[in-house]
Image (spheres, rainbow, N blue to C red):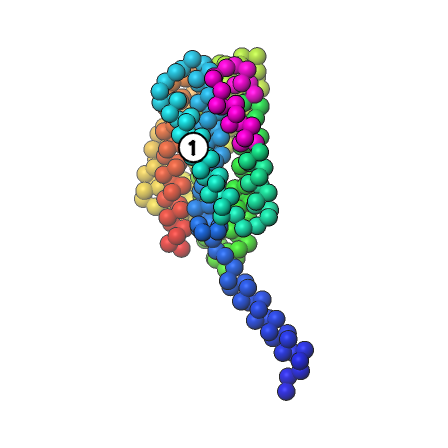
Amino acid sequence: MKSKKTINLILCAFFCVGTMLSQSKSYGKIPYTKAVNISGKQRMLSQKMAKSYLLLTKGISDDEIKRELNSSKFIFSKQLEILSANAETSAIKLYIKNVEKLWYKFKKLIDTPPSRKNSAQIMELNSRLLNTCDELVKNIEAKANYDSRFFDNDNKELVKIINMSGKQRMLSQRLCLYYTALSLFPDKKSEYVKELSDIFNEFDDVIGYLLINGYNTTSSEEELGAVMELWEKFQSDKNNFLTGKHELEDVFYSTNDLTTRFNKITGIYEVVAKNY
């Protein structure tokens, strides 16, 4: 007859295995791949709102820019609610609280009539909001790797690729934000040129990585081809871009197009992940 100690050990083992097998492979009620995509999109929206406000401060009172700012505010708030409602760990809840605190300050600024003073404050605050959003994405991605440890490496790699592709949306908007800031704040030109150069190089490097990854479909390759065609005009004239010699309107429309393309690409990778 088995000893009481042996029986307890067996029961404990069964309990542990059961707990591990029942571990969530989702972020609350949504898949981790969706959570990474949504939280990643928050990074892009933080830069899009800042960019739109600066463009309005520049006197470009285009209805499209006003709509962009208003819709981005609504989407950011709604997605933050979704992420908060589905958060299950105290660590991720804390990261969401950090985003909420900065979002409250940021929203107060972008809700005011466009001004150079407020634009300067937005330039100081936007990177802090971006960083807290990025920390949230990384922790959701890390939690996905932990909770989904019964997944194979393909799924973990796809979560990483979804994050990288999603980040390109943010970098597209950040390019236009700092390009606009060059002309709005000439006294900070050297600082902003350096930042713009760093953004440019990171964006360029990731395009190459995504192009050769093993999870591309015909659709993602077509979109990446369109991205490379759009990017070529800036890549081949990098020095003039970094010194603000391109038409601001062209940069605005081109970076929005790049954002749209990478949004599609990220969605394609998300679908691919579901099939693994």
- The percent coordinates of residue 236 (x first, y second) are 41, 23
Residue at image location 36% in from the left, 34% down from the top: 261
Residue at label 1?
74
- Which residues, given as a range, are shown in magenta? 102-121
Res 198 visible: no
Residue at image location 53% in from the left, 67% down from the top: 18
- The amino acid type found where label 1 is placed reads Phe
Q: Quadrant of residue 105?
A: top right
Nearer the observer, 98 or 240? 98
- Quadrant holding the N terminus: bottom right
- The percent coordinates of residue 87 (x first, y second) are 52, 47
Above/below status of 215 relative to 19: above
147 left or right of 34 in image: right
Above/below status of 246 relative to 222: above
Residue at image location 52% in from the left, 59% down from the top: 23
- The percent coordinates of residue 198 (x first, y second) are 53, 27
